[in-house]
Image: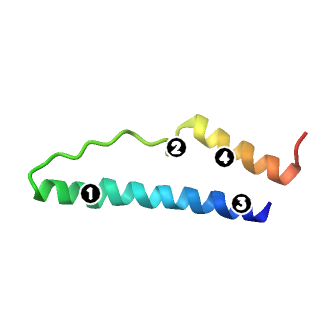
Amino acid sequence: MAAERADFMLWLGDNVHLLYDLGTEGRHVAEKAGAKLTAAEAVNTHPAFIKMLVDGVELKLVGSV
């Protein structure tokens, strides 16, 4: 279970880092090249995503019901 938590946290951290790379640095590179960068909106603080995170934490803390 500890490995699963670590894997999930790495996945979440990697995705946040990727969003920064594409959203901030990618946009800067695109603008310098005269292009426009358009990206799909990420889940970030969407209530369904937050609920999924909470449910996953609760399941690990309490165990399956």
State yes or no: discs 4 and 2 in contact (Cβ < 8 Å): no
Q: Distance between the residues labelled 1 and 4?
A: 28 Å
Horizontal side of 60 relative to 23 (left or right) equals right
Residue position for label 2: 45
- Amino acid, disc 2: Thr
- Label 2 or label 3, whichever lies nearer to me, is 3
Q: Mark 3 points at which residue?
A: 5
Residue of label 4 = 53
Identified by mark 3, the residue type is: Arg
Element carrying mark 3:
helix
Marked residue nearer the N-terminal end (4 or 2): 2
| As drawn, 62 above or below 2 | above
Q: For the residues marked 4 and 2, what is the alpha-carbon distance in whole angstroms?
A: 11 Å
Residues packed near mark 4 inside 10 Å, few (<14), some (14 to 19) or many (20 plus): few
* Label tally: 4
Q: In which quarter of the image is the N terminus?
A: bottom right
Q: Distance between the residues labelled 1 and 3?
A: 30 Å
What amino acid is found at the position of numbered circle 1 in the picture? Gly
Against 56, residue 25 (above or below) is below
Q: Position of residue 47 (x, y in %)?
A: 58, 36
Q: Which of marks 1 and 4 is nearer the N terminus?
A: 1
Q: Residue at x 11, y 59 (%)?
A: 32
Residue for badge 1: 26
Q: Which of marks 4 and 3 is nearer the N terminus?
A: 3
Q: In this rendering, which labeled residue sits more in front, label 2 or label 1?
A: 1
Tag 1: Cα neighbours inside 10 Å, few (<14), some, or many (≥20)? some
- The crowding category of the residue bearing disc 2, from other C-alpha atoms within 10 Å (few below 14, some 14 to 19, many at least 20), is few
The amino acid sitting under disc 4 is Leu
**Which residue: 23% across, 54% down?**
27
Say what secondary structure mark 1 lies in: helix
Question: CB atoms at circles 4 and 3 under 8 Å apart?
Answer: no
Vertical comparison of 15 with 65: above or below = below
